[in-house]
């Protein structure tokens, strides 16, 4: 069960999802999350499940986040996640002391949990109602880069170019390394003004067809002022593109709006499992926090795909 503080265990979150939402793979997923070394401990400030909308049903991945305590770093916790270079630097006297949030992502692969990815939060915007456009976190981004890669020089200029291309109307949100997946890449997430995504991609040198992307996303982006956009650095800007169909100006999201966009999403990506009922059933709040969800579109050389995310954020 959730603690009075509002923090939840992964297993508690998984049991709640299985109770409220009908979705393939959730029943066995409860035991899979509980079996993680940190699965039963009420540690987490934010939790998410991730599941594809097409392909073989049943795959569900797990994400969990730790928020800073009054800007002084993470809770004093022991566990295997402590081996992360990001957490080693996330202490009051560390290079990442100002980091507001650190995420871990456990993916299911060949019937087991893969080594978790670590995402370093660089912005408080998704956690608080404030405007976007803060570029002061570039200093924090440089520190995060040093915790993720040995040679930072090839990446630094590209990151600064991506931030400058926002033209003061967006923000760098978080970054992480894909090295645990055997890929020499960084993935960065930005809040970008809706309907300006194609222009931003063009300015940063994304190698895909930006005009076609702009036309494709037009209907999907209608309800939002800012959306989450993810790109990968190789160290140049790679072909991967992720677009999170949720509002990033306040960090809030209405499931009903997402449901209205499913037809537009399905026009781009295969959708074998309609997420509308799951989003509606999950949305709400209790004494400890808020339940929210969204759909993420991913464009890679093979085309578009879509994923469902259902999350919990404590008060």
Image: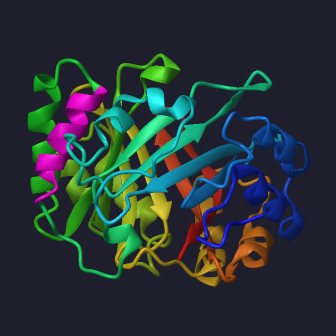
Asked whether, in this view, residue 279 is left or right of residue 211, the answer is right
Asked if residue 133 is positioned above or below residue 75 in the image, the reply reads: below
Placement of 120 over or under 101, stated as above or below: above
Q: Residue at x 72, y 35 (%)?
A: 36
- Asked if the magenta segment contains residue 220, the reply would be no
**How was the colour assigned to the protein in this rendering?**
rainbow
State whether residue 194 appears in this view: no
| x then y, percent, for residue 242 | 44, 49
Q: Is residue 299 left or right of residue 7?
A: left
Figure disc tally: 0
Between 235 and 298, the one lying in front of the other is 235
Residue 71 screen position, x and y as percent? 28, 61
Quadrant holding the N terminus: bottom right
Snapshot quadrant of residue 295? bottom right
Q: Nearer the viewer, residue 205 or 116?
A: 116
Give the quarter of the image for residue 58.
top right
Residue at 64 percent across and 25 percent down: it is 114
Q: Residue at x 88, y 66 (%)?
A: 19
| Residue 214 at least partly seen | yes
272 horizontally vs 127: left or right:
right
State the extent of the magenta-drawn residues as a range: 136-148
Name the residue nearer the viewer: 142 or 93: 93
Q: From the viewer's perspective, is residue 89 above or below residue 154?
A: below
Residue at position x 62%, y 66% in the image: 312
Magenta span: chief secondary structure: helix
Answer with left or right where residue 170 lies relative to residue 243: left
Q: Position of residue 122 (x, y in %)?
A: 28, 54
Q: Is 144 included in the stretch rendered in magenta?
A: yes
- Percent position (x, y) of residue 288? 64, 77
């Amino acid at each position: 069960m959730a603690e009075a503080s509002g923090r939840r265990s992964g297993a508690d979150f998984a049991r709640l999802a299985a109770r409220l939402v009908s979705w393939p793979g959730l029943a066995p997923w409860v035991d899979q999350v509980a079996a993680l070394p940190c699965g039963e401990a009420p540690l987490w400030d934010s939790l998410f499940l991730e599941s594809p909308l097409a392909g073989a049903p049943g795959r569900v991945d797990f994400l969990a986040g730790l928020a800073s305590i009054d800007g002084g770093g993470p809770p004093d916790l022991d566990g295997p996640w402590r081996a992360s270079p990001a957490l080693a630097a996330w202490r009051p006297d560390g290079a990442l002391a100002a980091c507001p949030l650190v995420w871990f992502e456990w993916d299911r692969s060949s019937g087991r949990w893969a080594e978790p990815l670590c995402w370093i939060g660089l912005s408080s915007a998704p956690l608080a109602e404030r405007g976007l456009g803060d570029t002061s976190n570039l200093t924090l981004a440089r520190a995060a880069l040093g915790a993720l890669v040995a040679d930072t020089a090839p990446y630094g200029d590209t990151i600064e170019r991506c931030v400058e291309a926002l033209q003061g109307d967006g923000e760098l949100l978080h970054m992480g390394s894909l090295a645990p997946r055997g890929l020499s890449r960084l993935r960065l997430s930005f809040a970008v003004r809706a309907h300006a995504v194609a222009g931003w991609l063009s300015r940063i040198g994304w190698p895909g067809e930006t005009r076609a992307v702009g036309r494709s996303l037009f209907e999907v982006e209608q309800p939002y002022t800012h959306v989450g956009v993810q790109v990968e650095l190789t160290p140049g800007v790679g072909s991967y593109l992720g677009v999170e169909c949720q509002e990033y100006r306040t960090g809030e999201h209405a499931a009903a709006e997402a449901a209205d966009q499913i037809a537009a999403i399905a026009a781009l990506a295969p959708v074998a499992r309609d997420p509308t009922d799951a989003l509606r059933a999950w949305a709400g709040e209790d004494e400890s926090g808020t339940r929210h969800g969204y759909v993420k579109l991913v464009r890679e050389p093979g085309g578009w795909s879509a994923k469902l995310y259902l999350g919990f954020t404590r008060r």
